[in-house]
Amino acid sequence: MKKDIKNVLDEKMQVKLPETLNKENILSELDNAETNITPMPKKKNTAKKVLPIAASFMVVVGLVGMYFGLGIGNKNAPVIGEDTGVVKYQSYDKVYERFDELHKESKKDNILNGFFGYADEEIAEGDMLADGSAVPESAVGSSTSDDKATNMNGGAKPNHGTTNTQEKDVDEGDIIKTDGRYLYVVNTGTNAPVSIVDCADGGMKKVADISLGKDKSITDIYVYNNNLVVIGRSYMQEKNTQTNNAVGDKEILTDDCVVVWDDTFVNVYDITDKSAPVKVTEFVQSGNLKSSRMIGSKLYTVSTYYVNVRDENYRDDCIPEIAFNGACEKVPAEGISIVEDTKSTTYAVITTLDVEKDKEPQCEAVLGECNKLYASSKGMFLSETDWDNKTQETTRIYRFEYTENGVEFKCMGKVAGFINNQFSMSYDGEYFRIATTVDKVTVDGFSISMSMDDRVNNLYILNNDMQIVGKVEDLAKGELIESVRFVGNMAYVVTFRQTDPLFVIDLTDPKNPTVKGELKIPGFSEYLHPIVDGLLVGVGKDGTLTGTNGDCKVSLFDVTNPYEPKETVSLSVGNGKAYSYSGVGTNHKLYINLSETEFAVPFTMKAYWNQEKPELVNCYIRYKLQNNTLCEVQRYDLGDDVGMILGGTYIDNTFYVVLTRTGQGVEVVSFDLETHEETGQLQTYKWDSNLW
């Protein structure tokens, strides 16, 4: 390679070059650079990362190409689309220039949040496990797996559960999956493994543990044919020298120790032999795991990568990296897009891996953060909420199209307000829909005020150029969006302050979305689920006309007539005797589809204090739709020593629940779906007793 470049230099010597780019200097740089690709090194802290020495080689070759037409460098910075506010460069030069500007601005701005804030890492709503470790993002709920699995005994595929996903053809990572015979369980706790459990004949027998070693936390798994995909975060523990409870992207582990989330890893295992899984693929990408999706055999992993521009060595860190089977390289310059009007120093990094092909993953990155991920089989979208001029929250939407090997950034759009969660977004291939809440902020000198009375809710429809073509604005003034569900050309939006308006919005004409009906009832739904045509299940808070009452309820809404939506059934969980809580509102994977007309939802209940013997009850409640009415079938009691209900699934007539026992570890409990009797318990992981 060096000889070829030397020949080109000799031939092109009539070109006048800057002193730093004369032939001797370039060849000297090549002599000093190690051109072998090296593994992604272990970092000592998040602010200062060591990059491969091969980067210097790439910089030199890029500079040579700019002057001699080698096809690597390009001074021009083409804008993607028209007025998108996003640019993509063909060399790293402009990227470095952007970070040089951000570095200079950081000297003038001491704000650590907002413009120079850390990424919103969403470590399971900030919860901590009983053993002191951070809760994985998906560990607040679950269910399970892949329709392509076959019976390991060679017969017909048994009936089994799948993960409750937003889109039917897009799988989502979970902490429990099944292929119809085996359970794959993510254990929570420090350096905990993934357990494989054989459930033949309704029993439970652990046949293998997949341990990833020290300083790794598993968050999600997927099962595709004979491939088990394990996703998580690598981290380091450091002494905490600060007096506050969290510093930047550090999450407190104990009183004097913090965990620094470093990179996102993906391991793929061949599980043909369930008792002896074999790792076949490993890759690492820069940044903290945000979310993932899987379509067919292709896995899409999103991380947020923060660059500390206050550090003087920021240039060493300002290009994200990926490492595939031990070989490390930077994200290609042509794969980096930059939002021009953002001062964010955080990338959203998207890596695509085909788990069935021994092929290098493809990577794209956007300098502009990522708060939420939405994906359908027709497109992928990232959202980022930021303050526009510090007085108005604005959500940027980045649209990606699927390619043969990965995703390609297409364009960016903007809408007013912030979103509730991934269900606030939807895409049908032509139009993108998004529901937002807008808080209006008043700035008077150094005083900033916000009034809930001025809060409004909007729904926007954007075309494939991310331009707004239709909208409904000023819904439910003074209220907050609690849940959204898009079903076909209809949108169902729940807002709340004291009562629950359920809005039914017709999206048939994208340029003229119309509110057809509105229903006001006590309480509100945190999660909406279409159960059959014209009927929606709502899970949320019970209440009165003056607000919530501490209990939960499960509702059935009849939206057959969009002009007159009705709540036909309202089932209280505590029955007026207990406070209750469900994690379904923050993790939809806790909602378990048992059949087309049956489902189960977990609840924790505590008796009112005026009871003589207050009781704590943890259970999954099973519901069934029968004759267009909803009824409670059974409460599967899990005991009063449950630390957290992590999720569940079923195989044939056996229902499995994964949970943690206070001071003990992770356990799977099974129930017979016909007799409702408990049939077994299996501890898949025991916590270190020294932690107690």
Image (cartoon, helix red, strand yellow):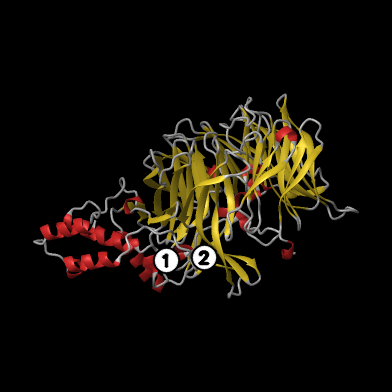
**Can residue 66 be seen by looking at this rendering?**
no
Residue in view at x 66 percent, y 28 percent: 158
Tell me the kind of residue under disc 2.
Answer: Ile
Q: CA distance from mark 1 to mark 2?
A: 41 Å
Residue in view at x 76 percent, y 58 percent: 663
Relative to residue 135, is residue 200 depicted above or below? Answer: above
Q: Position of residue 490 (x, y in %)?
A: 54, 33
Relative to residue 472, is residue 644 depicted above or below? Answer: below
- Quarter of the image that includes the C terminus: bottom right
- The label shown at residue 50 is 1
**Can residue 222 be seen by looking at this rendering?**
yes
Q: Residues within 10 Å of mark 1 (few under 14, many from 20)?
A: few
Residue placed under numbered mark 2 in the picture: 448
Q: Mark 2 and mark 1 in contact (Cβ < 8 Å)?
A: no
Tell me the kind of residue under disc 1.
Answer: Val
Q: Give the secondary structure at mark 1.
A: loop
- Quarter of the image that includes the N terminus: bottom left
Q: Residues within 10 Å of mark 2 (few under 14, many from 20)?
A: few
Q: Position of residue 629 (x, y in %)?
A: 73, 28
Lower sequence index among marks 1 and 2: 1
